Image (cartoon, rainbow, N blue to C red):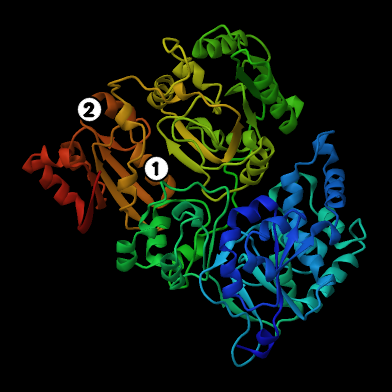
Amino acid sequence: MTEMEEHGFNTIIVITPSDCERLAHLYPRIIDNLVLGRLCFVGAPEIEDILKKDKKIHDLTKVIDENSIISFAEVNNCLSKRMEDILRGREMPRAVTGWYYQQFLKMQYSAICEDDYYMVWDGDTIPCRKISMFQEGTGKPYLDLKHEYHPQYFDTISKILPGFKKVIQRSFISEHMLIKKDIMQNLISDIEKNDQIKGEKFWEKIINSIPPEKITESSFSEFETYGTYVALRYPSVYSLRDWHSFRLGSQFFDKDTISDRDFEWLAKDFDAISFEKNQQMIGDGNTFFNDPYYQEKLSAKQMLQAIQMEFNGGYKEVWADDPVTMKNANVKKGVFENSKGVDNRTLFVIVSDGNEELLKQSVEGIKNSLSETNYKIEITDPKLPYYKAINTVIKSCEGSEYQDWDVYIIKAGTVVVYDSIHFLKQAIYSSDEVGAAGSVSNLAANKQRLDVHFDTPEEYIAFGEKNNVLMECPYLERVSLSSNGLLIRRETFEKAGLFDEKYEFCCLSGDADYSIRLLENGYRLRLVRNSFVFRLVWDEKEDYIEENSPIADFLYVNSNAFAQIPFRETEKFNVLEIGCGLGANLKAIRSLYENAKVVGVEKNKELCKIAEKTEKVFATLDELRKENDGVMFDILLISEKDFNTMSDEEKAVIGTRCCADFKVIAK
C-alpha cells in the first residue's frame, strides 16, 4: 500500500435512490476492496434512509445532496433552452438531463474535495477484488483504460477545449476514475475561459457547445474529457493501466444471489462486474457463468469471449491478446451507403383498434420526431380486420399526391422515436434490392424485441434516442419482418401486391406471407438495429402462426449453429449449408461476417425457388458439383437428418468442395 493510499481519499457515487436500493447489499464489497477515506453517495436525501438499513455501510458512508453541488433545475433549464426549437413546448426528458447532470456533479465535486484526489465510481459496478489506484514504486496514480470510441465525445472536447483531440487508441471510460483535484479544477477553469461559447459556468458552456440535435445522443463524457486533458497537459502525472470489467453482469448473474465463489472466479480475469438495470437476465439466472462445474473447466474470460463471438453489436470486453476484437469492438460510428437520393417522404399508416389514447400517443410521436413536410398520417377504420385495413388505406392513396410515398405501418400505441424513420430510410435506399426494413422495439413479434425494461414511457423514449445513432453494421438481413414498425418501399407493391386479407389479425403468418412475396420478387429485407420504436401495449396474437405451417421452421436463424462458428467477424471463410430453406442462416452469416461467402442447397423446390432469388442456392448437390467456381468451403452446415439421408455420391460431392480441415456444424 502506498503512502497516498494509507492516507486515503474519498470515493463518490452519483446515484438515484432506486438504483442505490437495488444494489445496496453489494456495497460492502466496495468498502472492502477499495482503499478509501469515505464512500460518499451524491444524490437525493432519501438515500440516507436506504443506507441506514446496513450499519456497516451507514457508518462508513456519507450522503451529499446533489443540489448542494449543482442545481438539477438549472441544468434542466439550460438544456431545455438549448433544445427549445426541437422540444417545441414539450418538457425536457428527465433521463437526458440526468445523463449530463451526473457527469457535471462528478466534475464540480472538486470544489468541495478536501484531499488531493477523489475517486468517482459507477453505482452499478462492484469490484471483484482489492483495487490499488497507485503504482507501486513510483507512487503515481493510475488512469485505467478500456476499449470504446464515440466520436461525438471528441467533437465536444474540441469545442470546449480548442486544439484538443483524441490522443490514444484506447478509452478512459472504465466505470471509475481517480481524479486529481487540482487538475480537475484547472480543466473547469479552462472551459470557463472559452469566450467563444455562451455561458458562464463550465457545464453551461458544455451544453451550449453541443448542437441541439445531438443533445440526445449522449454527446459528452467527463471521463474522456478529463483523460484527454491529462494526456495533453499533465502527461507525466499518471500511469496507464488496462482495466477489465464484466459489463453483462445482469444477464448472467442474479444480483441478489451472486456468491463469494462467483466473485473469486470472476476476480481471476475481471477487476469489477456491472449490473446495468436495463439488461434482462437470461433464463432463470442459472447459466454457465454461475455453474461451479463450468467454473472449474473454463475461466470467466474464456466464457465471455465465446459469448461475444456469437453476438454482434453491443459492448464487448477486449483483451490485448485478442487483436481482431480489439480492432473492431465498441466503435460507435458508421457511414451511410448510397445516402444520396433518399426519398424522405413517408405515408404513415396507423392501424387503429378504437383506443383514442393509444392513437394519440402514436400521432404525437410522429409529430415530435419528423418535419411536417415529410409525412402524411392515415388512420385505418377500427372496424376493419388488420390487413384489410392497411390495404384499404394504401389503395385509397392511389391517384393522390401520396401514391409514390414509402409506407410505414404501426399499430396504435407504437411511438416512433427521434431518427427511427431516418435509419429505416437509409436501409431501404442503401441498395435497389432492399424492399422493406423493420424497426426493433421493447415489445415485438418475429424476434425483433430488445430486452430493455424501464418504468416509464419517458425512459423508453430516452433509450430510443440513445439507441438510434450511427452504428457499425446496423443491419441484419431477414426472411421475415413484423408488419408493425415496417417501412415498405412503395414500388414493391407493384410487384409483390398488398397484404393477404385472409388473415384477420396481425400475426406471424400474415407477416411472413407478405415477406416471402417480397423475397419471391428479389427484394431483400433488413432489420435495422438503430431504429427503435416504443410500444405501450402488446397483443399475444402477433406471435400466432398457423399449425403445421410449411414455413414455420425456416423463418429464423439456428442460434445453436451460430455459436459454433470458429471465425472472427472480419475473417474470410466460405460456408455451405445443406437444407438452407429460405436462406435465413445464409443471410444472417452475411450480415454478421462481412467477408464470408455463403452457398446453400435446398431440395424442396418451392423453398429453393424463393431462396435463389436473393442467395446463391442450388436445388441439388449435383448442380453444385457442376458449378466450377473454385470455391472451397470451410464450414459445412447440415442437420443430422439431412446427413443421414444423403447418398454416398452426394457425400463425395461435398468432399470435393470442402477444405481438408473443414468444420461440420450440426443444426
Front residue of this view, candidates 661 and 342: 661
N-term mark: 2 or 1: 1
Quick one: which residue is furthest to the left in this view?
648
Task: Count every numbered label the image shows and give the total.
Answer: 2
Q: Residue 248's spot in the image, x, y percent?
A: 50, 56
For marks 2 and 1, give the CA distance.
Answer: 21 Å
Q: Residue at x 40, y 56 (%)?
A: 307
Indicate the secondary structure of the residue bearing disc 2.
loop
The reply, left or right, for residue 339 in relation to residue 370 is: left
Instruction: Return the x and y of residue 165 as percentages of the image width and height.
Output: 72, 67
Q: Quadrant of residue 398?
A: top right
Residue 76 or residue 343, whichever sits in front: 76
Q: Answer with left or right where residue 529 lies relative to residue 361.
A: left
Amino acid of disc 1: Ala
Whole-percent x, y for residue 50 in the image: 67, 56
- The N terminus, quarter of image: bottom right
The residue carrying mark 2 is: 604
- Considering the image in quadrants, where does the C terminus appear? top left
Residue under the image location 61 percent in, 29 percent down: 536
- The percent position of residue 502, horizontal first and vertical second, equals 41, 10
Left or right, residue 366 beside residue 530: right
Which residue is outermost to the bottom?
137
Q: Is residue 202 above or below residue 369?
A: below
Q: Which residue is mark 1?
A: 588
Quick one: 6 or 451, which is closer to the camera? 6
Q: Is residue 375 above or below residue 78?
A: above
Provide the secondary structure element on which disc 1 rests: helix
Rendered image: mark on residue 398: none
**Crowding near pointer 1: few (<14 within 10 Å), some, many (20+)?**
some
Q: Nearer the viewer, residue 97 or 522?
A: 97
Q: Amino acid at mark 2?
A: Asn
